[in-house]
Amino acid sequence: MDSFVASADQVAAISAVIAKPRFVNCEMLSVTVGTDPAWLQQVIPAPLVADGDSVRIMIGRWQSNCVEDFSGAGIYVPARLGDVHGEYVLAMYMDTDAAIIYGREVFGEPKKQASVQLRRANGVASGWVERRGERIIHLEAELVEDTGPLETTGVNFNIKATPSSDGNGLEHDAVITIADFDVRLSVTMAGPGGIALKGNGHDPLDTIPITDIRGAVWQEGDLLATSHSAATIPSDQFLPYYFARIDDYSLLDSETRAFPHKSR
């Protein structure tokens, strides 16, 4: 930026990227587990409805045309809005501010900052997410099956919401967004997987009920996205979901918290 006021050319260039983001040369490890359908219905806000009995946990890294290189992770649950089937993003973690800001402000993704690692060698892949001193996600996979290239599509449901400036509720009704992905994978591999989830007082991943592990996949390729607003949720109805998506600010009081004296 040359100024604190964007030029017409800058507005046009930024708008073009927002309209057609590209996340390319990606590497992604996903482990899918079974879960309790009743729990899914509790954590998915209406008018979205649960559309299965699974949870997909993914860790990946990407290049992009909009937020440079980044690594991240997501918790996805099957959901439906009317006759549109896809995945609701329950939680998401990223390691750069650009990826966090873009995802929150454009798609409405529930992104938080975290440290993310992903590795693959000799037919074994692993990845983990660390946040606030805890390893909250750890994935393992034995990639025994080469399933070849794949072209497909995907749908993510996210929700855009803003807290009121006076602390009372949300500023406006929440907006459900639909992100459509054109998925072009050059490599896919599959096999058995393992998973460990942990909470830290702000990320209740340890409350996800896991009934069985259904396998792991490794994917490499490109994700080309478009997004649009699809519906709204009354602010009072979405408020409990919103506060569960962010850190608990009441636990982050460094003003009155007692700290031991540090020796010098």
Image: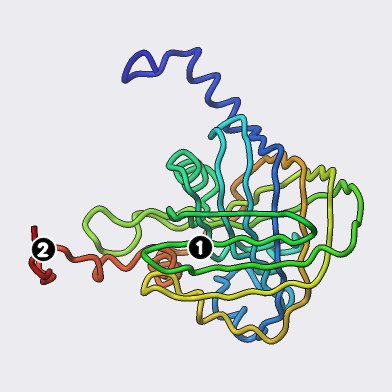
Q: Earlier in the sequence, mark 2 or mark 1?
A: 1
Instruction: Say which residue appears at 70% left-offset and 37% top-offset.
Output: 24
The local crowd at label 1, few if under 14, some if 14 to 19, many if 20 or more residues have their Cα within 10 Å, is many
- Count the marks: 2
The local crowd at label 2, few if under 14, some if 14 to 19, many if 20 or more residues have their Cα within 10 Å, is few
The quarter of the picture where the N terminus appears is: top left
Q: Which mark is residue 233?
A: 1
Judged from the image, the secondary structure of the residue bearing numbered disc 2 is loop
Give the amino acid at mark 1. Answer: Ile
Relative to the observer, which residue lies in front, 189 or 168? 189
Outermost residue, front side: 264
Q: Which residue is mark 2?
A: 262
Q: Which mark is residue 109?
A: none
Give the amino acid at mark 2. Answer: Lys
Mark pair 2, 1: CA separation:
48 Å
Say which of marks 2 and 1 sits in front.
2
Q: Is residue 173 left or right of residue 140?
A: left
Question: Where does the image place residue 152, in percent across and percent down from the top left?
Answer: 84, 49
Relative to the observer, which residue lies in front, 76 or 157? 76
Instruction: Say which residue appears at 62% left-offset and 46% top-offset.
Output: 61
Question: Where does the image place residue 188, in percent across and percent down from the top left?
Answer: 84, 53
Relative to the observer, which residue lies in front, 217 or 242? 217
Seen in the picture, residue 203 relative to 167 is either above or below; the reply is below
Q: Are marks 2 and 1 in contact (CB under 8 Å)?
A: no
Q: How is the image coloured?
A: rainbow
Seen in the picture, residue 186 relative to 218 is either above or below; the reply is above
Seen in the picture, residue 244 relative to 170 is either above or below; the reply is below
Q: Is residue 254 left or right of residue 191?
A: left
Judged from the image, the secondary structure of the residue bearing numbered disc 1 is strand
The picture quadrant where one finds residue 231 is bottom right
Instruction: Say which residue appears at 34% left-offset and 54% top-offset.
Output: 171
The quarter of the picture where the C terminus appears is: bottom left
